[in-house]
Image (cartoon, helix red, strand yellow):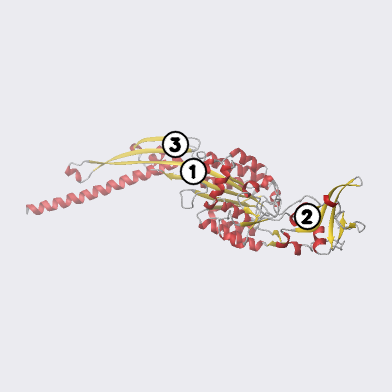
Amino acid sequence: MGFGVFLILMMLMVGGLGVDIMRFELTRSNLQHTLDRAVLAAADLDQELNAVDVVNDYFYKSDLSGYLTSVTVDQGLNYKEVSATAEMEMNTQIIHMMGINKLTAPAAGAAAESVDGVEISLVLDVSGSMGSNNRIHNLRPAAKDFVGTMLNSSPVGDVSISVVPYATQVNIGPTLAQHFNLTDEHDFSHCVEFDWSDFNTTTIATSASLQRTGPFDPWYTTEQNLVLPVCSEDPNNEVVAYSMNQGALESYIDNLDVGGNTSIDVGVKWGAALLDPTMNPVVTDMIADGDVDSAFSHLPTAYNEDVLKVLVVMSDGENTAQYYLNDNYQDGNTDVWYYEGYVSGQYRRIYSIKYGSTYYYKQPSGSRAYWYYPYYGDEPFGGDDAQRLTFPQLFHQASNRYIAYELYRDIWSSSYAGSYWRSYAYSYVGSGTKDSRTDAICQAAKDAGVIVFTIGFEAPWRGQQVLESCASSQGHYFDVNGIEISDAFASIASSISKLRLIQ
């Protein structure tokens, strides 16, 4: 009988212990949860209220004010860290019979917000339509604010930014191009022509031969300098790779020029490639040349490291035709010679075209290709001073579709050349194919772990569809007009900032 009573008492004691421990754990969990939420909110860099006040307010609204024991704040220009402790004593209901009258529930935690370990490719549309409706003027301050936000919210060296302007093509510029194996028919342009399969991967081979874009203008018929080349030769629109120089980036964005068609696929291809870890040898070489800061020697990091890789793609349009020279016109000598100088006291540009064993001389005039039949002979006009043009030189230096037409179609014709020569000299990739290429390269980037934000800036319906599909989710796509583009970039910057518990 006595032993039975003893067993019953023991069972009550054990059960009571379980009840008190369960109450204790619920109390501790509630206290810890409140503390975690409080320090997270207080550590937010966008939080304008005093961090200590924020933590106190969370505990007050949870009716736990009396249990907060300490709040510590450490913050600087690029970071904020908030830590706190709390403690609650709970009276026991049953196990006090064992001499345990109270249980103490402690809570501690810390949170910090900073932007560290972030690699960004900023892919910006600079096609001709960006010159309309103040778009380029609205883009510049928005993009500069984004750059400033990202660089000023982290320790120096934790954020790298590459900017990829794109129109019909992407001009990577001579500084970056020297680290790739571009074909050497000429050095008038620094753009690359990609095959369809290239858009299935984020990599760009540094050793394999890459076809350099031919230097020609499919739109204008000027006799000398290209007006709107397929590959921009404007140094203001060259790619900037792996920078953390805020002043230089802001000045660069201010000087972006507009012109040309729209190739979202090519812009994303280069943006994704600059985030791909296979680009590390290029970074190493650029550091050695003094073109990239040595703090970025580890870039681009492997995809599986704790680093945020972000692709931000902006366009005001939709993919349009991308022109390229046909293979037969990429390289080699033409039968055109060029002489520039004084003739009988007048400064002239004279072309000689060889037909059989005879050279016929042409002095361009107006919009027609006039031939001057008295000017012929057994050597080019100008003799040894005449320069035989290669195909790249013909398109770049002469930039005259009438000469090209008469050379490749019918050198005896003096009629308007129109667009007939195009079927001989160049072709194009259409918008439908480029939409598919954009889908492919965006998916390749997302599959690799890159976070993709896209901005449709007053874009037409088809362009919006391509950009929305490219984004990591619907929440990563922004459809904006006018000065709303600043809000889009600000939202993206806020999303990139990494808010995390550190304890």
Query: For residue 210, what is the image quadrant?
Result: bottom right
Which residue is outermost to the left? 1
Mark 2 crowd level (few <14, some 14–19, many ≥20, 10 Å Cα): many
Q: Quadrant of the C terminus?
A: top left
The numbered dot on residue 389 is 2
Number of marks in picture: 3
Relative to 172, 26 lies left or right: left
Relative to 224, 285 lies left or right: left
Q: From the top left corner, tell me how far across and down residue 381 is, in percent.
A: 86, 53
Residue type at mark 1?
Asp
Mark 3 crowd level (few <14, some 14–19, many ≥20, 10 Å Cα): many
Of residues 303 and 128, which is closer to you in this image? 303
The numbered dot on residue 407 is none
- Earlier-in-chain disc, 1 versus 3: 3
Relative to 251, 29 lies left or right: left
User: Would you name the residue on which mark 1 appears?
Assistant: 116
- Using the image, determine if residue 239 lies above or below residue 371: above
Tell which tag, 2 or 3, sits nearer the viewer.
2
User: Would you name the residue on which mark 3 appears?
Assistant: 51
Residue type at mark 3?
Ala
Q: From the top left corner, tell me how far across and down residue 323 is, in percent.
A: 70, 59
